Image (cartoon, rainbow, N blue to C red):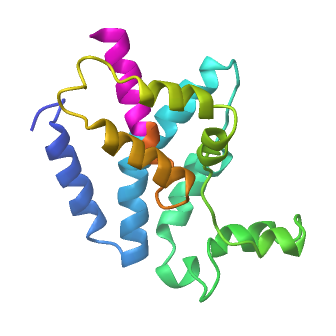
Amino acid sequence: MTLEPTWLGWLQRAADEARKLELVAEISWLEARSYMASTLLRDTDSVSMAQSLEVRVPLLDTPLTEFVHTLPDGARRRPGMQKALLVEAIRDLLPGEILGQRKRTFTLPWEEWLHGPLRKKVETSLANPAAALTPVLRPGGVKTVWNDFLAGKTTWSRPWSLFVLNEWCLRFF
């Protein structure tokens, strides 16, 4: 074993440690040591520093996380209640309507932006494909993707991907 193990070796050791735990604890263990550490915390750090914000993650305090990892799955979960431990810990601090909300992700309002302030820019770009793309993109297909988005038949991500690709090609080819 070396002091600088490969990513695969490190992940294998983390998975071996996780297998000793109950199912929910196993998933939490792997999540904390992979996606959360390598992506979520890194991205939060870089985005916050870019805006001169100091971000703290109090629920990742080492003694707290070590304690929670020792709890059996039965103590972590409640039927019909997401994030049961967190809800129970702050129940007296927040109104019931907040505690009762379903978990949801934070999503930027791309659809609203593409229908509003970005619409003209995206339409202009999609109507004028980069020379590098003309051999591989059918203008009718690009127009269909945009019209399908406007009609609510497809998500914002399809025209946005084409827009970003086109703008990149215009800039770098």
Residue 142 rendering spot, x and y as whole percentages: 36, 40
Magenta span dominant secondary structure: helix
The residue closer to the viewer here, 114 or 8, is: 114
Quadrant in which residue 84 is drawn = bottom right
The residue closer to the viewer here, 22 or 136, is: 136
In the depicted structure, whether residue 77 falls above or below residue 58: below
> Which residue occupies 51% across, 57% down?
66
Q: Give the range drawn in magenta.
A: 161-173
Residue 117 rendering spot, x and y as whole percentages: 69, 32
Q: In which quarter of the image is the N terminus?
A: top left
How many numbered marks, from 0 up?
0
Locate residue 13 relative to residue 168 in the image: left or right: left
**Camera sees residue 22:** no
Quadrant in which residue 129 is drawn = top left
> Which residue occupies 51% across, 73% down?
71
Q: Is residue 51 magenta?
A: no
**Camera sees residue 20:** yes
Locate residue 44 relative to residue 143 in the image: left or right: right
Locate residue 70 relative to residue 64 in the image: left or right: left
In the depicted structure, whether residue 57 falls above or below residue 98: above
The residue closer to the viewer here, 71 or 9, is: 9
The residue closer to the viewer here, 157 or 49, is: 157
Q: Does the magenta stretch include residue 171?
A: yes
In the depicted structure, whether residue 96 falls above or below residue 46: below
